[in-house]
Image (cartoon, rainbow, N blue to C red):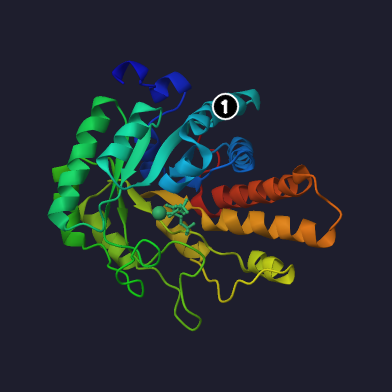
Amino acid sequence: MQNNRVSYKELGLQNSRDMFSKAVNGGYAVPAYNFNNLEQLQAIVQACVETSSPVILQVSKGARNYANQTLLRHLARGAVEYAAELGNPVPIVLHLDHGDSFELCKDCIDTGFSSVMIDGSHLSYEENVKLTRQVVEYAHMHDVTVEGELGVLAGVEDEVASETHTYTQPEEVEDFVTKTGVDSLAIAIGTSHGAYKFKPGEDPKIRLDILAEIEQRIPGFPIVLHGSSSVPQELVRTINEHGGKLKDAIGIGEDQLREAAKSAVCKINIDSDGRLAMTAAVRKVLDEKPEEFDPRKYLGPARDALKELYMHKNIHVLGSNNKA
Ligand code: G3H
Ligand code: 13P
Ligand code: ZN
């Protein structure tokens, strides 16, 4: 197995270390966009090249199973070459999103990922520290960076008490980062995964006060925000106007994310907004042109919509434009 190891360095990828220190000092956040297919990757690379933004290509366990890890690795290598071909070789990280075991993280490190997340947020504090430490030790031997998580996001990540958030306790963060050696820390401050982050009538606010307290305890340490889609209402409307059924989908206001990006938040995870943009574009084409059956005729517009979305995020939400 050792002989078959593929280092991310051979693929032209980077780990997240420099990217994060620049982002923390520069008052912006690096986009972490999930992908599992060609059109998403094309849109991400085109958008980041045109806005000159560093980027984290994020792959979940489910995405890895869906797309095949070997194909994904070659796509990531392709992304590096494609960016150069487009004339702007922006820095690219290939990151495992929500790794749930040491074995999965190890497998990703051994097959070309430059960064992994070990999500021990459902475990007891001690178990989370132990598992995260184990992943850090292996990852750092290979110069791969590690993201840990403290606190539990409501929604799909919190199967036990899906109604409530378990916010990160600021008094735990220093101990956690010291004991584990992680390179960045995902925190729970009221964001959540998916398209239904708040109920109608709820005040859609995240706890920037907890973020500020965490920042005081670990100044300059790279913080990560998951569940940071804004669920643009025009996309929800387009989906519903063309046969979709998304009721009361509500996301995080872009102004709050912009505020967070100016602080020690240096990585912002966005997946659901991309899903909405693709779905809206595909539904529109298939509804308005029922005679189309060439996938390029609906995936092409979906790719264009995604690219526009990512350019908007980079420039107006993360502030990562011109930071490559
Ligand atoms: O955090 C979850 C990401 O949006 C990935 O979702 O597990 O359905 O690929 P997935
Ligand atoms: P969203 O569902 O808000 O896009 O969050 C994505 C995410 O956190 C991936 O890890
Ligand atoms: Zn997440």
Quadrant where the N terminus is found in the figure: top left
The answer to whether 254 is drawn above or below residue 132 in the figure is below
User: Which residue occupies 34% across, 31% down?
Assistant: 109
Q: What amino acid type is highlighted by mark number 1?
A: Gly
The answer to whether 179 is drawn above or below residue 75 in the figure is below
Quarter of the image where one finds residue 213 = bottom left
Residue at the limit of the structure toward the top, as seen here: 3
Looking at the picture, how far across and down is residue 142, in whole percent?
Answer: 28, 25
Residue where numbered disc 1 is placed: 78
User: Closer to the camera, 296 or 301?
Assistant: 296
The answer to whether 209 is drawn above or below residue 26 in the figure is below
User: Closer to the camera, 281 or 213?
Assistant: 281
| Residue 88 in sight here | no
User: Which residue occupies 46% across, 64% down?
Assistant: 256
Label 1 CB sits under 8 Å from any ligand 1 atom: no
Please give left or right for residue 113 compared with residue 74 in the image. left
Looking at the picture, how far across and down is residue 286, in whole percent?
Answer: 78, 57
Mark 1 residue element: helix
Looking at the picture, how far across and down is residue 48, in whole percent?
Answer: 58, 39
User: Which residue occupies 18% across, 41% down?
Assistant: 133
| Residue 317 in sight here | yes
The answer to whether 45 is drawn above or below residue 250 in the figure is above
User: Closer to the camera, 51 or 302?
Assistant: 302
Looking at the picture, how far across and down is residue 123, in whole percent?
Answer: 21, 57
Q: How many discs mark residues in the rendered view?
A: 1
